[in-house]
Structures are given as C-alpha cells and as structure tokens.
Image (cartoon, helix red, strand yellow):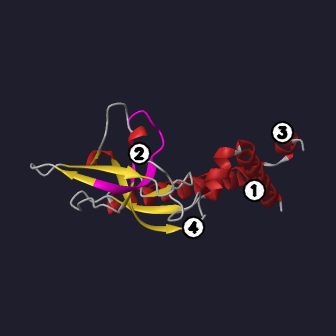
Amino acid sequence: MDLFGDLRRMNKRQLCSCFMQLYYQVLNFAMIVSSALMIWKGLIVITGSESPIVVVLSGSMEPAFHRGDLLFLTNFHDDPIRAGEIVVFKVEGRDIPIVHRVIKIHEKENGNIKFLTKGDNNEVDDRGLYKEGQNWLEKKDVVGRARGFLPYVGMVTIIMNDYPKFKYALLAVMGAYVLLKRES
C-alpha cells in the first residue's frame, strides 16, 4: 500500500474526488459526535441531573441492581429525598459517583435535610465512604435519583475500563472496517 505513490499517479479530478470523500467522511463523523453531545446536553436539561445515565460499577446494590446495569437518573431539586430511595452521590475526594439507598433522613427545623446511605449488599452504612468527619449527605452531594434501568447494558463500559487492550482492539477493528469499506 503505497499511499503517496497512488496519490502521485492520480489526475486532478481523481485527487479532488478522493479528498472530497475524505472531507465528507470527516464531516459525517463530526455530525455524529455533535449530535451525541447535543442529545447528552438535552438529557441533562430535561432530567436536571449532571449525569443522567450511569453504570453500576460494583455489586454493593445487589439484588436491586447488578454490576453493569445502566441507570437512568433525574435530579429535580423540588422533590424531597425519602428513605428507601436509591440515589447516586459524589463524595469529596472520590472521582466516581456511588449508587446506594437512603436509609435514614435527618430533618432540621429550618427544613434542611441530611441523610444516610447504605448499599443493599453491604453490612454497614456509608459513613466510612464519606469524607473524614462527614456523617450525613446533603442534597448538594446528590448527582441523581434512580428512575429506571437496563440490565447489564453497561458491561461494555466496564470491560473497556477494566481491559484497556480490548478498547484498543475494538478501535482497531472499527478502523479496519472503515478502511476496507472505503476501498470496496
């Protein structure tokens, strides 16, 4: 495959056609990426959650949710948090949000609510996961509340994170497919 030799042998019309095909492929790819970003931003606005879709990464919520389940979240600030509700929260010092159930609510006289969480499959509550000195979560810690799920759909994400070579192999296969399709 001597790409530059092939390009030198082409006349101007063939060369222009080749570059136009490349231009359209790049443009098509850019449109796909921008459409996905617009859909994601739209979901953020509609659901009120900074992350409207998350993947369950551990077995701490079994049997309610399993590793690899895809959760759909909302986070409307007017809705009160209730005991028994499944929330996704972020803790200072941890990069990955946690999916657990609210087990206790602590409401102050001024209306502020604090709450305690626990994984259904865990023996103890989550105070050991919170930042040092923190015993309760607040609404500001909540990324979203589970409203629905698709079982095991997120396993692809987990596999690509756990096995980076798989991710690169998948990208190589997709690239080879595009190149072979272009040549045919």
At horizontal 53% and vertical 64% (from top left) the residue drawn is 63
Kindly identify which residue carries mark 2. 126
Q: Earlier in the sequence, mark 3 or mark 4?
A: 3
Q: Are marks 1 and 4 in contact (CB under 8 Å)?
A: no
Q: Position of residue 96 (x, y in %)?
A: 48, 43
| Of the two numbered discs 3 and 4 in the rendering, the one whose residue sits closer to the viewer | 4
Q: CA distance from mark 1 to mark 2?
A: 47 Å
Q: Which residue is mark 4?
A: 151
Crowding at mark 2 (Cα within 10 Å: few <14, some 14-19, many 20+): some
Q: Secondary structure at mark 4?
A: loop
Quadrant of residue 74 in the image? bottom left
**Which residue is depicted at the point 53% across and 55% down?**
56
Amino acid at the residue labelled 1: Val
Dot 3 amino acid type = Phe
Say which label, 3 or 2, has the lower sequence index. Answer: 3
Q: CA distance from mark 4 to mark 2?
A: 24 Å
Coordinates of residue 94 in the picture (x, y in percent): 45, 37
Q: Residue furthest right?
A: 1
Q: Reading the chain from its start, which is encountered first: label 1 or label 4? A: 4
From which residue to which does the magenta span run? 88-104
How far, Cα to Cα, is label 3 from label 1? 19 Å
Mark 1 or mark 2: name the one nearer the start of the chain: 2
Q: Residue extending furthest left? A: 110
Q: Nearer the viewer, mark 4 or mark 2?
A: 2
Residue at horizontal 37%, vertical 34%?
131
Disc number placed over residue 178 in the picture, else none: 1
Crowd around label 3: few <14 · some 14–19 · many ≥20 (10 Å): few
- In the displayed structure, 79 sits above or below 98; it is below
Q: In the image, is 15 to the left or to the right of 6?
A: left
In magenta stretch: residue 89 = yes
